[in-house]
Amino acid sequence: MPQAPDADLSACITRAMAYVSHWCERRLANGVLDPHNYGRAVDALLKGAAASGAPAPDAVIDGLRTALLDLTDNPLGFPHAGRQTDPHDLREIVQAFTELATALDDRIARERLGRLLETWLRLTNPDGTWRADLIAAEPGLRHPGFTDGRHGIESPPPRSRARTVMALTHLVRLTGDQRALELADRFVRLARAKAFTDDGRLTMQAGTHTHSITGTVHGLADYGLLTGDLDTLEHARRIFDVGLAPTRSSFGWSIESLGDERVPGRGEINNTGDMIQTAIALGLAGWPEYFGVAERMIRSHVLPSQWLAGQEILRPPDAPDYAVTAFPPDADGGWGFPSPSDRHVPDPLGSATSILDITQGGIQALWAALRHGSTRRGADTRLNLLFSTDQAAANTGSRLPGEGEVTVTMPAAGGLWVRKPDWLPWDELALDRAGEAGGAIGFRRIAPWAVTEPLPAGTVVRLRFSPVRRTQEEWIYWRRHRMAFEGDTLVEMSPRGRYAPMFAELREPVD
């Protein structure tokens, strides 16, 4: 039974980039106009290249860029596919043009992005609501995603505006664009006022599109981190813990839709990617326990649910006809719509073969983990996530989950802060100098951190511990699931997956 892929996040990203490129080549060759997926593809390929070192294919990027420029070649700068703009696509355009402008120094993409931001500012009020009079005067904006023409009711804020905050804050970090910051501020206020209660519960105006909701929470956390808005940060944390709790599992599965489910238990990796990035932002903001949440979601849901050639696919005798062809052979490297225990759950409407949209979410989650797996604060290095990385903050080698050993090469002289996983007892964590007999390193305990004295640059610190095996039970989407973890890695689950199992079946009783 295949276990979760190894923790080589760069290799996982590279495989996913190959899938994205293959998918885009076919769509571009057929002349398909698709601002939503093309915007995601540019973001995935360029972020993936930055994180993994694997080059984004020039021909694919050029084709996507040409298509997106054609779609936004109008006075508004909004994507007009089929002569109308769906505001749900605006985040994707911002992400794509941001990556083109900053990673490739694309002057035209930068100008087009500026036009879009100016239009967006003009069409919204300071509280984030739409200027209905201006929108009504634009034939290309008569899409129900702006307002319901029959009732004059605005679409749910997460689906059309608030989900874009995470793209706008990223743009601000890279360029300092104050127009993007003003839009983010408007949409944060709108979401907090209408989509969530003060104690973090979802309101009716949150809508039913889970990815828009998780994307909004991601944006709230990142906006709070960027601006130092502690009130928004705390609100994002409450929503993550309270409002999202009924929609997800502890290890990262998240329901595809809060509305009428075509396929019960079908999840979406986009949502998981948002939750991972939210947890990382909360960890960076001063709640380090959320780094553990992010790591568990990556190890126990994102990595095992990546489609890889050669993994087991079952053909249940009572499966409907559509399930037989639900796993196309050219999907190697992509992500889809997993259940808690299945790598992908087929959809009778045929969306099983269109998973580019979802694969961006998987790439973004791993990109964020590589960027923030280790960080520098003053002279000290902080090891937030226990993955192998080769980043400026630290070079880290992980043997998890097979062995409880992680090495960290100090990039400069200073102390090392190691986040102790919440399942590991303090007396089972040991630090020493790799390759040196008797080279034990003492440390202080500061909350979940093991903190060493200053160490010379180049010191190779080895963490040693046993990945604790533990079992637990969760009710996920009206069904009881029993599971076993080794450290943060889910290794066995009952009931076992029906179509493409991710885990061996758990046969022992839970603790």
Image: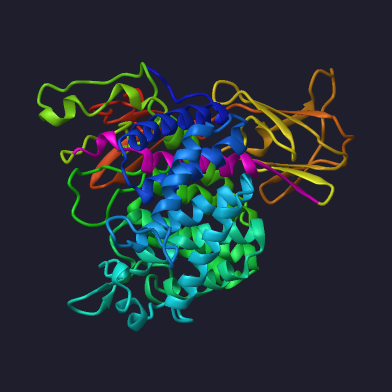
- Whether residue 198 appears in this view of the structure is no
Residue 331, given in percent of the width and then of the height, sits at 35, 27
Q: What residue do we see at 85% from left, 38% from top?
A: 412
> Magenta-highlighted stretch: main secondary structure?
helix
- Whether residue 37 appears in this view of the structure is yes
Q: Is residue 440 above or below residue 380?
A: above
Q: Quadrant of residue 386?
A: top right
Q: Nearer the viewer, residue 240 or 163?
A: 163
Q: Is residue 414 above or below residue 436?
A: below
Residue 458, given in percent of the width and then of the height, sits at 85, 30
Q: What residue do we see at 27% from left, 53% from top?
A: 257
Q: What residue do we see at 42% from left, 71% from top?
A: 191
Q: What residue do we see at 41% from left, 52% from top?
A: 70
Q: How is the image coloured?
A: rainbow
Residue 322, given in percent of the width and then of the height, sits at 14, 31
| Region of the chain picked out in magenta, as a range | 350-377
